[in-house]
Amino acid sequence: MRALEKAAVGAGGGANHRFGLHDMVLIKDNHIAAAGGIAAAVEAVQRANRRGLPVEVETTDLEEVEEALSLRVDRIMFDNMPVPLLRDAVARVRSHPGHHPETEASGGITLETIRAVGETGVDFISVGALTHSVPALDLSLRLRGIEEA
């Protein structure tokens, strides 16, 4: 079903930046906690990343954004940040000397908030509801016996 969900996003005008974890390394909060911090998680991935996949790190505050910037990751995800904090996070990335990773807003994005999120200047906006909260189309095939037709 994942391929169909991704195709539906594309058909609706959206863009899929990755199909799965084989396209990009995504270091999320549980990975960070298990590794003992952002730096430890990123360093572990960098040691094991034989395919040279881009590395994205989830952050929730400006301190974590600064840490991810110092590690020179490819993309920084801003998770569940309110718009004013998101604006500050984007500004920090843009003003960082020498390294400007891509930025992504994620978490709680709705039709009501997406414009304000986009106006912060983030490169990407993830809307998980496009795939995990869309009602399924009920498709069925009913066979009738010849005598019923």
Image: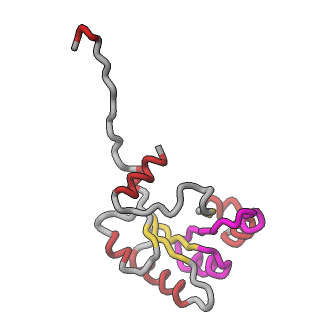
Q: Position of residue 10 (x, y in %)?
A: 40, 58
Instruction: Please say whether residue 17 is one of the residues in the magenta stretch.
Output: no
Q: Is residue 149 above or below residue 97?
A: above
Looking at the image, which residue sits at the far left?
149
Q: Position of residue 69 (x, y in %)?
A: 62, 80
For residue 49, which quarter of the picture?
bottom right
Residue range corresponding to the magenta coloring: 45-74
Say which residue appears at 29% left-offset and 11% top-offset: 145
For residue 23, which quarter of the picture?
bottom right
Determine if residue 144 is in view: yes
Between residue 138 and residue 115, name the one nearer to us: 138
Instruction: Please say whether residue 48 is one of the residues in the magenta stretch.
Output: yes
Say which residue appears at 75% left-offset and 63% top-offset: 50
Q: In which quadrant is the C terminus drawn?
A: top left
Determine if residue 36 is in view: no
Q: Is residue 33 above or below residue 133?
A: below
Left or right: 83 as drawn, with respect to 30: left
Q: Position of residue 4 (x, y in %)?
A: 43, 47
Q: Is residue 85 above or below residue 22?
A: below
Between residue 134 and residue 30, name the one nearer to us: 134
Say which residue appears at 60% left-offset and 81% top-offset: 66
Q: Is residue 54 above or below residue 34?
A: below
Say which residue appears at 35% left-offset and 41% top-offset: 136
For residue 22, which quarter of the picture?
bottom right
Looking at the image, which residue sits at the far right?
47
Left or right: 16 as drawn, with respect to 51: left
Q: Position of residue 90 (x, y in %)?
A: 48, 82
